[in-house]
Amino acid sequence: MRSKLARFAENTERNNLIEPGKPIFATIQGDWSNYFGNDHPIILELGCGHGEYTTGLAALYPNKNFVGVDVKGARIWKGSRDAEVNQLTNAAFLRIRILQLENSFANQEASGIWITFPDPRPKAKDEKRRLTSPRFLDMYRKILKPDSWVHLKTDNQALFEYTLEVLEERTDISDLVFTDNLYNSGLYEPEQQIETTFEQKFAQRGIPIKYLRFRFC
């Protein structure tokens, strides 16, 4: 098992990992198409952890580009490595806090967002830190192209219900679909079937996986 310091050192050498300290970090906003070398849609996974969903989507959709976003360098090291090993040139990783998204993506530069098993932040005082809270949704709307999908997968019933309440209170949401039992729904399509380490653990314990998606209008 590589130490965190060893992983951090390897991250500095990886072309598919963008982080503070690398020259590209300061210039990537609005330049993602040039970075990937094409004008394919750019889909984000927020709080990507080890990057299983980012690399899974990249393998499933070679004509789209995927960026896994997480602040934990020792975690995204794995996704970056897996993308290199599997020659997924349409997968990249960005090491930032989610609140800094607007510093790395221009308005309407992204074409979709996946939020996979985020920290539910159950304490009331931490509501603003939930990735589906109003301040984050406002940010997503700015960086997304019109008609882009936002997806949420979670095991947490409270976060799922909170998100639905937030979405119902907004006037800029369309095409909302949701299920509190993804595996037994008609929404369990190939891209929903990619599993993270967290999802595998929850599924093995018999915890239903919740899923929703929507677009801004």
Image: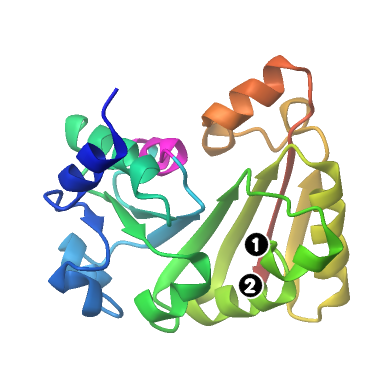
SS category of the residue bearing label 2:
helix
**Mark sitting on residue 131:** 1
Amino acid type of disc 2? Answer: Phe
In the rendered image, residue 60 lying in the magenta stretch gets the answer: no
Q: Nearer the viewer, residue 93 or 180?
A: 93
Cα–Cα span, label 2 and label 1:
6 Å
Labelled pair 2, 1 in contact (Cβ < 8 Å): yes
> Residue 10, relative to residue 133: is it above or below?
above
Q: Where is residue 186? Give x, y as percent.
A: 74, 34
Where residue 50 sits: x, y (%)? 42, 38
Q: Is residue 52 part of the magenta span, yes or no?
A: yes
Q: State whether the magenta stretch is mostly helix, strand or loop.
A: helix
Image disc number at residue 136: 2
Q: Residue furthest top?
A: 204
Decide which of 20, 132 is in the foreground and name it: 20
Where the N terminus falls, by quadrant? Answer: top left
In which quadrant of the rendered image does the C terminus lie?
bottom right
Determine the image quadrant of residue 108: bottom left
Q: Which residues are magenta?
A: 50-59
